Image (cartoon, coloured by chain):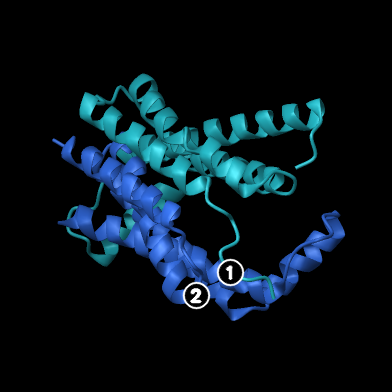
Chain colours: A blue, B cyan
Amino acid sequence: MLEFFFLFMIIVAGTGGELCVSRAMKVVGEVHDFRPAALARFVLRAMRVGWMWIGISLMTLAFFSLLAMLSIENVSFVVPVTALSYAAGAIGAMLFLHERISRQRWLGVLVVCVGVTLVWLSRR
Amino acid sequence: MEDSPSLHLKTYILILFMVLFAPLGNVLLSKGMKEVGSANNWELGDLLHILFSVLSSGYIWMGITCLLAFFVAYMLVLTWADYSYVQPASSFSYAVVATLSYFLLGETVPPLRWAGILVICVGVFIVGHTHPRTTEKA
């Protein structure tokens, strides 16, 4: 039961964190200048966006959930199963960022879900 | 993406770094967490003890270092290579993590899990071959 909770946290908090960071990045704007000083200014600008901090908090939560999951399950099981985040990412991007998801991307997500099911069934 | 032999070489090297460092980081985290162990009763004292063990584990810090190296390689390669090129290539990391867990941690990887990992790689490959921008540019 605990495995389900940690897996849920890895996928939902991890994907939620990435979506928040993505939203923050869209607020900050596209990077054109890759010189170190410009990148440092970019990071400072990103740190002033609230979504960035929510994203970092959620990703930290996902990281500690990953550690907890790795303490009870094999890494060859845990890492492939976290590929479910592709499905969570597509759904979250559609609902939260209002992105259009193509049929091909949904097909890819479906294939990932089939693969995750096979990995889950391999669990003893 | 500009087409030149040196750019191709640079891209392949960084993708190789990504495909090795992310799985190696996860395998090291797994090794560290197997040593630390899981919580018995999930009480605050127990959790704090585990947190201390996690933060003082060499394997965990090596794992975090590898994941940071992966992240830097990922960010660098994305500055010139297309996301739709990088993401499918990095899908091999699912197979690499299973291979490393077999050789470094002695984990048993059943055939069904290999099959699942192969299907996941195909799925990620399909996702990666979709257009990276799904919204209209403002």
Could you tell me the amino acid type at mark 1?
Answer: Thr
Helix, strand, or loop for circle 1?
loop
Residue at 52% across, 51% down: B130
Q: Residue furthest top?
A: B103
For label 1, count other residues whose C-alpha is less than 10 Å away and answer few (under 14), some (14-19) or many (20+). Answer: few
Same chain assignment for discs 2 and 1: no
Q: Residue furthest front?
A: A103
Instruction: Give how far apart the Cα atoms at labels 2 and 1 are.
Output: 8 Å
Which image quadrant for residue A77? top left
User: In the image, is residue A3 above or below residue B67?
Assistant: below
Residue at 41% across, 25% down: B100
Which of the two residues, B23 or A25, is positioned nearer the viewer here? A25
Which of the two residues, B7 or B95, is positioned nearer the viewer here? B7
Residue at 31% across, 51% down: A68
Helix, strand, or loop for circle 2?
loop
Q: Position of residue A104 (x, y in %)?
A: 44, 52
Left or right: A103, with B102 as reference point:
right
Do the residues bearing badges 2 and 1 touch, measured as CB atoms within 8 Å?
Answer: yes
- What number is the disc on residue B135? 1
Q: Which residue is mark 2?
A: A98
Is residue B37 visible in the rendered structure shown here?
A: no
Could you tell me the amino acid type at mark 2?
Answer: His
Q: Chain of mark 2?
A: A
Q: Position of residue B78 (x, y in %)?
A: 68, 47
Left or right: B42, with B133 as reference point:
left
Q: Chain of mark 1?
A: B
Which image quadrant for residue A87? bottom left
Q: Position of residue B111 (x, y in %)?
A: 23, 24
User: In the image, is residue B31 above or below residue B80?
Assistant: above
